[in-house]
Amino acid sequence: MEEDTARLQRKREHIDELLELFPFWGSRQAMERTRPKNPEAGAEPKYEPSDDERAVLAKQAQRLKDQVRVPRMNFVEDVRGGRLEFDHPDQAIAAALLREAFGTTTDGQFAKGLIGYLCTVLLTDENSGFDYPRAEDLNRAISYCRR
């Protein structure tokens, strides 16, 4: 209980310091009056979805559960130069997951070609010494191409 009182006192002192710096905010008392005593009292009742909405949400959840999770790709720059790598401990397994996400499991050429095309059309990262896009942009583009 004493800890709560001390914490509240520190909070009030901090607000008073801020009000000295920013007097146009008003007073601490005015700020405290505008806060609701019980924030849940003014809250509206929680929305309950209809049966149709629940069915759609259940289908969406199942689809997300069944979706192949593709490891993120990173651009690595080291003494060997610049290259793409998966953020995964096993690069071969990560490549198989990517092929599955693209809907082609027999040949890695399609996935490699698509990644190459995506790297070509995305803007180049100015902070890179190589002609690579930002990894975030490539990963977002891959998410658009997944089946």
Image (cartoon, rainbow, N blue to C red):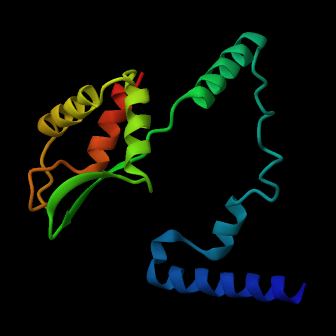
Displayed quadrant of residue 79: bottom left
Q: Nearer the viewer, residue 18 or 1?
A: 1
Looking at the image, is 99 positioned above or below residue 30?
above
Who's the residue at 82% across and 82% down the image?
4
Percent position of residue 119, x then y: 17, 40
- Along the line of sight, which residue is nearer the eye, 116 or 36? 116
Dividing the picture into quadrants, the one containing residue 63 is: top right
Query: What residue is rendered at 77% in x and 35% in y?
Result: 44
Q: Nearer the viewer, residue 66 or 18?
A: 66
Tell whether 110 sits left or right of 66. left
- Residue at coordinates 37% horizontally, 30% vertically from top-left? 99
Q: Is residue 1 left or right of residue 68?
A: right
Instruction: Specify the quadrant that holds the N terminus.
Output: bottom right
The residue lying furthest to the top in this view is 52
Instruction: Name the residue rendered at 44%, 56% in the picture.
Output: 89
* 77 vs 138: above or below: below
Above or below — where is 114 with respect to 69?
Answer: above
Assign the C terminus to one quadrant of the image. Answer: top left
Relative image position of residue 24 (x, y in whole percent): 46, 71
